[in-house]
Image (cartoon, rainbow, N blue to C red):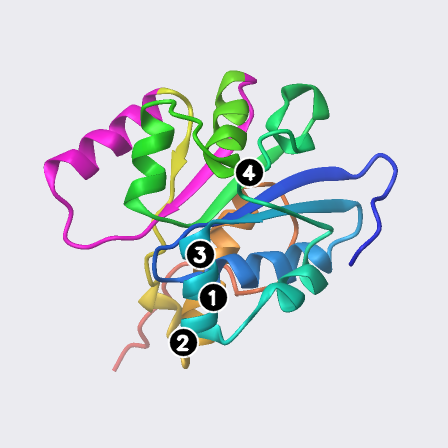
Amino acid sequence: MNSARAHARRIVVAVSGASGAAYGVRLLQALSGTPDIETHCVVSEAGWHTLRHELEMDRTAIEALAGQLHDIHDIGAAIASGSFGCEAMVVAPCSMRTLAAVAHALADNLITRAADVMLKERRRLVLMVRESPLHLGHLRNMVSATEMGAIVCPPMPAFYLRPQSVADIVDASVARVLDLLHVPHDLTRRWEGLRPVAAT
């Protein structure tokens, strides 16, 4: 487990039960290799099931990536208070259940409480929502979360980057999140415009 660093930027990474646990894991990997970033992670009960099913990862594997791993039921954890001073939070992936709780300020577990803290303190909250197709309730919850200050950032493949693997697709979406957090990275190349077509 990484030790806490003085004056580090604190970022919360939450993994909910939606498919796409690789996004949260890749984000933790990228942040753990970034100087002056202190990560705090919380995984929902369904999130643990998804981590095991999709990536064969357990608590020990996540603890090795996160600066500190918090229990989903520990409402008294440091990240549950605005005074702790976390700079940003990403829910990766964000289930429709978690989105609904955030949109309605339910704060009924540590993920949704920490997200509520981000909103009330006017700090950055990024929701990598995962579902398809979307019904009206999903869309309305996205609007509500956006109106409160969250950034809804679905992991969408960028095929103009010509991904060669699933890892490339995951990296492209995580790179967009790192940009939103103002964290430097080299996960993917940046778009520099279309090259002129040679005259024939």
Q: Is residue 195 above or below residue 108?
A: below
Q: Amino acid at mark 2?
A: Val
Q: Which residues are magenta?
A: 121-147
178 inside magenta stretch: no
N-terminal of the pair, mark 2 or mark 1, is 1
Instruction: Name the image quarter holding the N terminus.
Output: bottom right
Question: Is 69 left or right of 198, judged from the image as shown?
Answer: right
Of 176 and 112, nearer the camera is 112
Image x and y of residue 3, in percent? 84, 51
N-terminal of the pair, mark 3 or mark 2, is 3
Q: Amino acid at mark 4?
A: Met
Residue wearing tag 2: 166
Mark 2 → mark 4, Cα distance in angstroms: 24 Å
The circle on residue 69 is none
| Furthest residue toward left | 136
Bin the neighbour count of mark 1 within 10 Å (Cα to Cα): few under 14, some 14-19, many 20 and up. Answer: many
Taking the spot 74% from the left edge, 45% from the top edge, the residue there is 38
At mark 1, the secondary structure is helix
